[in-house]
Amino acid sequence: MSLENLLQQIEFIKEIDKIKYIQRKTKLINSDRNENDAEHSWHLAVMAIILAEHANHPVDLMKVIKMVLIHDIVEIDAGDTFIYDTQKNHCNTDEERLAANRIFGLLPQNQAEELISIWEEFEAGETEEAKFARSMDRLEPLLQNVSNNGGTWSEFNVKYHSVYKKKKVINEGSSKIWEYAEQLINDSADKGILKR
C-alpha cells in the first residue's frame, strides 16, 4: 500500500467521526437520551451477527455488517430523516447520493467504489443481504420505542398503521423476526402505547 492510500484512508476515518454527532429521533432502550448514528450502526452490526441464523436465506454476514456500519454515513452531509416524517421522503435522495460520492470518495478509488456499491445495494433492498440488513435497521428502533412506552411514536403522534407499514419490511429479511416484531407492534397497540 502506498503512503497516498494511507493518507486518504486516514482522512476518511477522521471524516466519519462526524457520524457520532448525528442525532436520531429514537431514544436508547429504557432511556430519555437520543441515540446517535454511530451507536445505531454499531448496534445493528452486533444484531446482525447474533440474529443471522433467522434470515430467510443464507447471507454473506460480512457484507451485511459492512452495510449496516456504512448505511448512515451519508447522514454526515444529508442529515437524519425521521422514518415517519410526512414532509420529506425517507427514500434515497439527491442529497444522500452527493454525500455518498463525497465521503466515500475520500478513500482510494477501489475502496470508494466498493463502499458506494454496498451502500447502493442496501438502499435498493433487493439482495438477501440488503433485505436482512434492512430488517435489522427496522427492528432496532422498534425495540427502543417499545422499551420507552411508545417513545417517538408518542412524541410525534405516529399511528399504528404507519408503524406496521414501515416495519413490515422486516419480513423480507426474516419472517421469524417479523413474527416477533408484529406481535410487539400489536401488543403495543393493545396496551395503548401505539395509537390505532
Image (cartoon, rainbow, N blue to C red):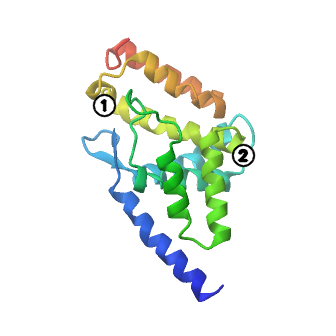
Residue 43 picture location, percent across and down: 47, 50
Q: In terms of image quadrants, where is residue 20?
A: bottom left
Quadrant of the image for the C terminus? top left
Q: Are marks 2 and 1 in contact (CB under 8 Å)?
A: no
Q: What residue did someone put label 1 on? A: 151
Q: Relative to 122, is 91 above or below?
A: above
The residue sitting at 55% across, 59% down in the picture is 101
Q: Alpha carbon of mark 2 to alpha carbon of mark 1: how far?
A: 32 Å
Q: Amino acid at mark 2?
A: Val
Judge by depth and name the residue closer to the eye, 179 or 63. Answer: 63
Q: Relative to 5, is 119 above or below?
A: above
Q: Amino acid at mark 1?
A: Gly
Judge by depth and name the residue closer to the eye, 72 or 90. Answer: 90
Quadrant of the image for the N terminus? bottom right
The residue sitting at 49% across, 49% down in the picture is 96
The residue sitting at 40% across, 40% down in the picture is 81
Q: Relative to 3, is 95 above or below?
A: above
Secondary structure of the residue carrying tag 2 is loop
Secondary structure of the residue carrying tag 1 is helix
Graded by Cα atoms within 10 Å as few (under 14), some (14 to 19) or many (20 or more), the crowding at tag 1 reads: many
The residue sitting at 39% across, 45% down in the picture is 80
In the current view of this chain or complex, which residue is farthest to the right? 58
Q: In terms of image quadrants, where is residue 38?
A: bottom left
Q: What residue did someone put label 2 on? A: 59
